Image (cartoon, rainbow, N blue to C red):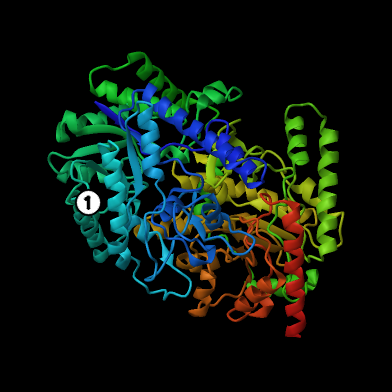
Amino acid sequence: MASHIVGYPRMGPKRELKFALESFWDGKSSADDLLKVALDVRLNIWKQMADAGIKYIPSNTFSYYDQVLDTTAMLGAVPPRYNWKGGEIGFDTYFSMARGNESVPAMEMTKWFDTNYHYIVPELGPDVAFTYASHKAVSEFKEAKALGVDTVPVLVGPVSYLLLSKPAKGVEKTFNLLSLLGKILPVYKQVVTELKEAGASWIQFDEATLVKDLESHQLEAFTKAYSELNSACSGLNVLVATYFADITSDAFKTLTLLPAVTGYTFDLVRGKKTLDLVKSSFPSGKYLFAGVVDGRNIWANDLAESLSILESLQGLVGKDKLVVSTSCSLLHTAVDLVNETKLDDEIKSWLAFAAQKIIEVDALAKSLAGKKDEAYFSANAAAHASKKSSPRVTNEAVQKAADGLKDSAHRRATNVSARLDAQQKKLSLPLLPTTTIGSFPQTIDIRRVRREYKAKKITEEDYIKAMKEEISKVVKLQEELDIDVLVHGEPERNDMVEYFGEQLSGFAFTTNGWVQSYGSRCVKPPIIYGDVSRPKAMTVFWSSTAQEMTKRPMKGMLTGPVTILNWSFVRNDQPRFKTCYQIALAIKDEVEDLEKAGIKIIQIDEAALREGLPLRKAEHAFYLDWAVHAFRITNVGVQDSTQIHTHMCYSNFNDIIHSIIDMDADVITIENSRSDEKLLSVFREGIKYGAGIGPGVYDIHSPRIPSMEEIAERINKTLAVLNRNILWVNPDCGLKTRKYAEVKPALSNMVTAAKKIRTELK
């Protein structure tokens, strides 16, 4: 029985690639140094899977930034502003598209389906001249083959690539991106032909958009694409992978009738209903790659349950046509549990990271082949029994409190217009008030102090003193820049979700459980294993300390319940909304304590609210209802004069704007700069918004420093569609990943632009 892995984490167990990328971007290492580290990471990944007995090992899932940008490079679809002259695309052009450069901004970045991973959005139009400009897929296949590892090259499927793209600037928004299918397929044919000539026997096309709600013409595009690719794929086994959700019956029918396709990968973890489609109408003679091992979460697989599913499928498709697989790429989980030497032993027994999931896949495949490892299965069953019965998982008081939330809408008693009036009387803010989103650069010294404190190399007193000094510097800088509403810079927080999770019950933490978010940015999601509560205040001391340093309003900074949920590895033994309500109650306690401490503005970030939106429209209403409700729970008890902010970043918000309004925040700051002001289009189309709003005026995910004129132009664009009295001026996200050499001039330009326009508006 064969085994398959859809994809694998790229950064390496010690984030080798992350540090190599950053060293290269900082000019501290050469391209050759970066290439060497990247090759080592790839070789280790292939060797690990080969040693574990995996038959279908993916290649071309490694990336220096993301796989969609890699596909853009492969197709030569470089926007004209990067001044690419043709030929093989090198690092300069590639990273300029991802990060921008001194002259031009980066391409838009948005979330990959409903994950916290980001991709660079292709900018396409009728005049794009596609050309085969990156041979990465072929080169990596040859690298693996030279090691004796026969891999399955993975490409983003042509239809999904187009559906994940956007019309380029200047192109009509109604432009049919699928009309470009005939122009990109010749490049795909060239890639397929080269892979075949290099010795590939299988090729995988990731067509993840098949799990979304597609119209008939979109489904027809898949048939057209694979009919066109049929001759080029002759002699190859073609695998089409879908993941993250159920596939509709129409999409299932389209997929299973595609010419040239030999096998299909289905997510049978998040796509429970897909199993019924497979059982009722799976095509005879085709390969089924059954995704029974969860690629999105870190819980150990229930091997007995998975084996039962696989045995039922084996009788349906045949022993030689069933392949055990992960549900999706392991890119979305941590790398290796072996690195977690400090994790609680009981909790550790409940977990499986990418390296362990490979072993689970192989163990299931061997069991189907009659080589069941009884000891391994027995240990797995014991771990599941332990998790189910452990007293540390359940807190009856928390369960009761969360269950009691259903009977109230939890809305503030006064409407937002009246609240804003009360807040302005207390705050006396100018027109177009300026602020930042929360974090300031995390310097080497800050990180060192935090490490030393955690390692107990310095006392708590020394730690607090160092953090106060850093906060003081950030406060003084903001006052010098003349920013209106200040933040304390969050020097005590390595990661905002991890920070709050460390102070809440029901959370566990890893030492090396890093997951890639975008580029070299990695996060370390907490693990929610049990009921959540707040034993004590979490941020009141730091916010109060910062407020004492200035007469200007200081924002209290919290992470919202939906974002904590979506940016954690969440327990899988109860509905997600129940866990979210528990977190909301904990944040509610913190909000009310901040208010009692005299904090007049409290920001409750819900950066990931849109990210958690289900991929199928039929499931949207239920999710948005409980997600918005959870946010309102956090601040329902504050006075009218306390201003509640929230923040969202890097997602398409237009389709949930009514839910954003329903959150009933006093001010929302939101990403706008990298996406060509897509957010503003909803207001041009007549959506009425009466609360404060700060569409980000510059992109903090790029090292590029925007000019005052550029920021002023962006502010004027927002003034064309938004009332001046509700408009705020701010960057589009926190400044943690930037350097002070970038932050100071950018914020100075931002404040100068706001003041200039204030004068013009008087």
Q: Is residue 706 above or below residue 761?
A: above
Q: What is the quadrant of the N terminus in the image?
A: top left
Residue 732 image position (x, y, % from top left)? 63, 61
Q: Nearer the viewer, residue 112 or 685?
A: 112
Determine the residue located farthest toward the left in the rendered image: 284
Q: Is residue 406 visible?
A: yes
Residue 200 image position (x, y, % from top left)? 28, 37
Q: Residue at x 40, y 38 (%)?
A: 140
Q: Nearer the viewer, residue 332 or 712?
A: 712
Is residue 596 rendered to the left or right of residue 298? Answer: right
Residue 233 image position (x, y, % from top left)? 22, 46
Q: Nearer the viewer, residue 670 or 383?
A: 670
Q: Is residue 687 above or below residue 463?
A: below
Is residue 598 rendered to the left or right of residue 7? Answer: right
Q: Amino acid at mark 1?
A: Leu
Q: Nearer the viewer, residue 709 or 137?
A: 137
> Total marks drawn?
1
